[in-house]
Each structure stands twice: as structure tokens, then as C-alpha cells.
Image (cartoon, rainbow, N blue to C red):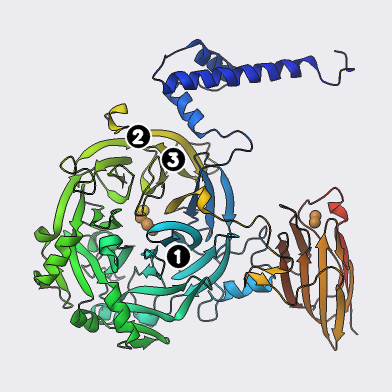
Amino acid sequence: MSRRSGTPWWRHRSILIAVAAIAVFALVLQACTTGGTSGSSSTDDINTRREASGLQPLSDDQLLAAGMTYLPSGEHDPYIMIASGGQSGQMFVIGVPSMRILKEVAVFTPEPWQGWGFGNVGTEEILAAGNIDGREVRWADTHHPAISETEGEYDGQYVFINDKANARVAVIDLRDFEVKQIVKNPIAIVDHGGTKVTPNTDWVIQGGQYATPHGWEYAPIDTYESEYKGMVTFWKFDRDSGRILDDQSFAMELPPYWQDLCDAGKLVSEGWVFCGSFNTELATGAGEDGSGEHFEAGASARDRDYLHVINLDKAVEIAQAGNTFDVNGFPVIGLQTSIDEGLLYFAPEPKSPHGSDVTPKGDFIVVSGKLDPHVTVYSFDKLMKAIDEENWVLDPYGVPVLDFDSIVEAQVEVGLGPLHTEFDADGYAYTSIFLDSTVAKWSLGGENYRGDDGWKLEGTLPVQYNVGHLVTAEGDTVSPDGGYLVALNKWSIDRFFPPGPLLPQNLQLVDISQPNDANPETGGMQVLYDMPLGMGEPHYAQIIKADKLNVFEVYPEIGWDPGTMSVDPNAPVAGNERIERNGNKVEIWMTAIRSHFTPDQVNIKQGDHVIWHITNIDTSIDATHGFAVPGYNINLSLEPGETATVEFDATMDGVFPFYCTEFCSALHLEMAGYFLIEPTE
Ligand code: RUQ
Ligand code: CUA
């Protein structure tokens, strides 16, 4: 072909075909959504092309699903999902419904792209606050993100996330999606039942799990009943400073049952907290002498465990009055105090319970038993009445156990292995069913929801496979959106190409916007998209409307310190770059702008103590610069306007070309400098 035109003829043809295919696709979608034709010629066209590419043909339903998730370049998702990162110790930001990963936010684990934990003094200090007895713990098992709330609605300001493995909590500011604080629980070494927030984010809830002596002191296992303790911790959050105030936080001592997921009351039940538990058997495992049973059997022997019903408002009063004891300097309300003051009650829950979810109006609490095919729904009114009437017996630790029949509102059979429940705007609830690998849709009864039409199963949708948590859009707030649901499936088995024997998770996007009769079997639910995630096991996620997030596109002022969210008074700015030497202390004030560092030669002597400040003085969106010093394990990410500081002893002599790690301009490769460390004799 002639090369004169610059573009081969077939390029033009392929553009034409693409345009035609898009038009056809739009027609098909229209046909599908208006209940239209099957096997239309346009579907055939698409399928002909798919087959030519070695792909399977699509049904009308599948074409519709594709059209529901496809976003053309430049279109943004209406929802943002914040997912835990499991063993990665991080947090994922994912667009819904496109299911595109926007960011893996560095939380507990060092992460080089974000310059998290590679010499940046600010990030090192935050990570060091999560050290345990002086030991650096640089991974985590993140489980439950909790977006901050105002009056029970996500407000998009902060998100909290717990580390199950080491009982830590992180605070992330959603203006820049960076971690501002990590706190280590002073009384527990592992947790699980958090984080959740109270409706105005006054308190961040961190429930326990595997009981240990408080402060994880040693005590022989045969002293389990007396020396091992459960716990729930309430961290006081100060919205203005964006920090947890540990000197105003407190914990409650609980029996050594294994506390599980908690949820905060809302509206009518505001001021109360509900935490599931298991191992009320007090099993201690199989000993090496063959005594005892595995926890699998020992901790699931009883038919009922206890939902912990906690009067948080009253607990706050008791803690503030100082009616506590100290563990590692942290105030703890003793179990007997909780019993005497009426802070703690148990509601029996069947069998091997896991989830605990408060309904949108705060009027019911839904729990599931992994070994019971029902969800059990308690009425908050009935709980309060049973407490008023002292309708209880005492458990071996003296905690009142409320009468089951008088507090249960309904039980709905949903399938084998129910776990977690979220809600939509129409009075429906969605429960993940682990063993059956389904999502069950059922109706809430009562005047706030579907009245006499409630408390029944509406349909089940098979998911692939073994769903843990599920999440609906704003689904645990006082006004759920519904529309979309994501099933966080634990197994993916055959869904994707296997990249070795460790398989990705499968996050499955489900359309829940359709009425039950759209598909009577599934209650109108349809799987839209399978998203493999090969970076850790996201346990829980929350989905927030994207327009609630007020994100900085660039930092508001040059010299910004993300740690304090204000200008660093010591920040280098254009014109004041310099190197000051004072004995063996060398302090550098450097700026970065496309495409150079100022200064770009730094001469010091071996053994000098180096304090190196850098400001990215670029102010355009996305003009990030990196700063890497080879051999010294130093790497920064400097977003537009940001200042960071590294501090180290220059023990190794030599010549170290430092450079910008972000391809920021045509002369990015030239954005480098020489760091010369002269040996000392
Ligand atoms: S867990 S699959 Cu929330 Cu950590 Cu239930
Ligand atoms: Cu700055 Cu590359």
C-alpha cells in the first residue's frame, strides 16, 4: 500500500467498524432494556466478531451486563468502593460499577510508589506508632474499613481500618487518601470486631477476638477461665484534628468468649453497640498430650453463643468517672462494674454466629449463625423491654442472658452458612451465604420497611464462590442506596486463568436495581462482572457516592505537610534552597520541579548526619515527582505542593546518583543529581 497517506487503509476501515459496532451495541442495549428482542442481528454482529477473536458468544443478558459496567475513557464511576486489603495490610479504592482499581492505599505495610515507609520521616513515625513492644511489625491483616459518618450517613471525610493480626487501627484522611495515624491496642494483641463507627463518628469500635490475658501477658492455658479476657475498645475520635485521642479512649473487659464483628446502633438504638461472639464453650484447643478438641469442634459445640448488647452511652459515663482499672496505662471497665452498672447483656444467638448488622432505622439487629440456615432478627424495643423487666438468667460470669423468645422478632430461612447482611432503599436485606455460595435477598418486615409483606426470602443468586462479606451501596447507613451489590468471594476456583496455585479473590458485582419479578428465582438479582483481585483478601468493603468525597487534586499550598495537613514552616520553597553544615550535621533544603532538583549536587562527608527536606513546587494536577537515593533504601513520592523530610546517617561512602522515579516530563531522565559522600580517613 502507498505510505503517502501516513495511515494504512485498513486503519480507517477498523475505525469505521468500531464506530458501527458501538452504534450496534447501543441499539442492542436499548432493545434489551426495553424488554426487546433476542438474537437480534446486532447481537449476531458482536458475536461474530467475538468468535473471530476466540471469545465465546454472549447472550442478551450478558451483553446487557457488559453495557452496565463499561465506562468509556474519561467517564467516572458514580460510586467508590473502599475495600480492606487483607494480608497486604493495605486498603483498595475501586470504582463501581466499572470495578477498576484506582489505588492500593498504603496503610500498615511499606509501599514504595507512595513513598510510604522508605525514609520519609512523617510516614516512618506513623508506622512506628504501630510497633509492638519496640518490634517493627510491617504487615497487617486488614479486615473492616469504616467510613466516617454524620448522623448515620457516610460523610466522606475519613476512613478507619483494623489490623486483625496485631490489633491496630489506622485513620485515613479522604482528602488525600493518606494514613494520618496508627494506634496499637494496649490490651489486646489480636482483634476482629472492628472497625465500625458510631453515627457521628464520636467513637471507633474495635472488638476483640481470640482471648488472651490483657496486655498479652503469659498465663498457662489451664487458667483460661479466670486469666484470659475478652474485650471491646472504644477509641475517641476528634474530627477537627482528625485523630484518635487515646487519652480519652477506653476498653471494656469481657468474658473470654471470642468477640466477633460489632455494629453500632443508630437512630432509635443510637448509644448501643452489638457484638457477636463465639467459643462461649471456652474451648482451649487440642493439647500435645491428646487432651481437648480442635477449636473447630470445641468452639462450635453449643447451639447458642451470645450477642453482646452494650450500653455505650453509659459506659462512656463510667469511664469518664474513672471507674476503671489500668492495663498498660489504658483505662478498662471491669466486667463486674459492667454487670453492676447495666452496661452489658447477652442475647443468645444461633449457631456459631458471625455477622451482626443493624437495620437502616436502627430498629432491628440481624445476626447469622454459620451453622444455622436462618438469619435471626432481634427487635431493639424487645431487647430494651427484656432488660427493663429483667427477663434473664445469668451466665457463668454473672452477665444477664436475655430470654431468646422474648427478644426475637423473626427468623428467615436463607440457606446454609449465612454470614453478613446489608440493605437497600426498598426494605430488602441481602445476606451472604457462604456454604451455598449464594446471595439471599429477603424482606424486612415492620412498619419502617415492608410491613406484613416482610420476613420472607425473595430469591437467591448463585455467586462464584463462597462469599464472605457482601456490600451494597451505602448499605450500612441510615439510608442505603442499593442498586449495586458486591459479593466478596473467598474462592475463585475456575473463574480466571490460574497464576499459580495461589488464586485471586473474586469480587463479583451484582445488579440489585431490578424488582423481584424480573427474575423470580434470584429476586431480580443479576451478576454483572467478575473482578479478580490478586493482592490480598478483602474482607469487608463500603461503597460511597463518589460526589461525597472532597479530594485534593493538588495540595492546597506549596510546602504542604500531609502529616499535619498544613504548610510545614520549614519547607524549602523556590529561592531559599540551600545546604547548611554544622559540625557533622548537614541539612538540605531542596525543591523539585519539572525537570530538575535544586540543588542537584550534594557533597557531604561519610558519617555526616543528613536531614534532607524536599518540596515539590509543581502545582499542576498529577505532576508528582519521586526522589530515590540508591543504596540507602530511600524513596519518596512528592505530590504537587508536598514537602517531605528524610533523615539518616551517611555511613556508606561513594557516589549515589539520586533521581526522580515518576516519568514527569520529556526531560524526566535528566531529573537527577549527584549525592557524593567523601570517605573519611
Ligand atoms: S470477617 S467473612 Cu468480617 Cu473479618 Cu466475616
Ligand atoms: Cu520528576 Cu521525573
Name the spot of residue 359 as percent of width and height, x first.
Answer: 28, 54
Disc number at residue 360? none
Discs 1/2, front: 2
Disc number at residue 525? 2
- Look at the image and tell me in which quarter the C terminus lies: bottom right
Answer left or right for 460 relative to 159.
left
Residue count near mark 2 (Cα–Cα under 10 Å), binned few <14, some 14–19, many ≥20: many
Q: Secondary structure at mark 3?
A: strand
Q: Is residue 364 above or below residue 650?
A: above
Discs 2/3, front: 2
Callout 3, which amino acid?
A: Gln
Q: Residue furthest top?
A: 41
Answer left or right for 145 relative to 647.
left
* Distance from the alpha carbon under mark 2 to that under mark 3: 12 Å
Callout 1, which amino acid?
A: Asn
Q: Quadrant of residue 521?
A: top left
Residue behind label 2 places its C-beta within 8 angstroms of ligand 1? no
Answer left or right for 149 relative to 596.
left
State the residue position of label 3.
508
Callout 2, which amino acid?
A: Met
Residue at x 72%, y 70% (from the top left corner)? 644
Task: Decide which of tag 2 and tag 3 comes sooner along the chain.
Answer: 3
Disc number at residue 162? 1
Q: Secondary structure at mark 1?
A: strand
* Distance from the alpha carbon under mark 3 to that under mark 1: 23 Å
Residue sitting nearer the eye, 133 or 493: 133
Q: Secondary structure at mark 2?
A: loop
Residue sitting nearer the eye, 648 or 289: 648
Residue count near mark 1 (Cα–Cα under 10 Å), binned few <14, some 14–19, many ≥20: many
Q: Is residue 44 above or below residue 596?
A: above
* Distance from the alpha carbon under mark 1 to that under mark 2: 31 Å
Residue 302 appears anywhere in the view: no
